[in-house]
Amino acid sequence: MNTTKLRDIAHARTGDKGDVSNISIVAFHIDDYARLAELLTVERVTAHFAELLDLNGPPVRRYELPCVGALNFVLPGILRGGVTRSLALDAHGKALGAALLDLALEWQAAPPDATLRSTS
């Protein structure tokens, strides 16, 4: 079994509302979604961001979007008050997606080529 970074099998998009950030992880290839959903659990994401989350606050939630090969994670309180109240350098939490893509995963096969395939 190989170890690979999440960034080798998926990309991320982030958003914010108040002090809540959401991170969408989208598999490059739909065939990888089931394995990605198995490995990228709420517990794993919570552990990855443990230093930034209020572990006594609301829990991280995961929403599954299998038709588009995506997982959406909602991280309450991670933005420390949100854009208008936080003094953080990244008040919108845009770097959180990149931070999650640094997560190492045990992957059964070599990661697929991350280049986009032409549909023509």
Image (cartoon, rainbow, N blue to C red):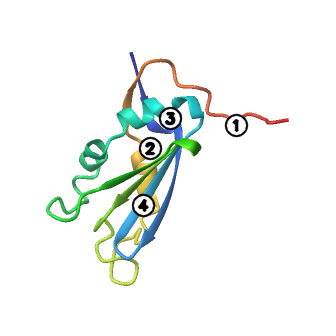
Q: Name the residue under label 4.
A: 22
Q: Where is residue 105 in the image (x, y as percent from the top left)?
A: 38, 30
Element marked by disc 2: helix
Residue at which label 1 appears: 116
Q: Name the residue under label 3.
A: 33
What is the spatial separation of the Cα atoms under label 1 and label 3, in whole angstroms? 16 Å
Q: Residues within 10 Å of mark 4 (few under 14, many from 20)?
A: many
* Label 1 element class: loop
Q: Do the residues labelled 1 and 2 touch (CB within 8 Å)?
A: no
Give 62 or 75, whichever is nearer the viewer. 62
Q: Do the residues labelled 1 and 4 touch (CB within 8 Å)?
A: no
Of pointers 1 and 4, the one earlier in the residue sequence: 4
Q: In which quarter of the image is the N terminus?
A: top left
Q: Distance between the residues labelled 3 and 2?
A: 15 Å
Cα separation, mark 3 vs mark 4, equals 19 Å
Amino acid identity at mark 3? Tyr
Q: Mark 3, residues whose alpha carbon is within 10 Å: few (<14), some, or many (≥20)?
A: many
1 vs 4, front mark: 4
Residue contact at pointers 1 and 3, CB within 8 angstroms: no
Residue found 33% across the figure and 83% down from its top:
85
Where residue 30 sits in the image (x, y, percent)?
Answer: 58, 34
In which quarter of the view is residue 81 placed?
bottom left
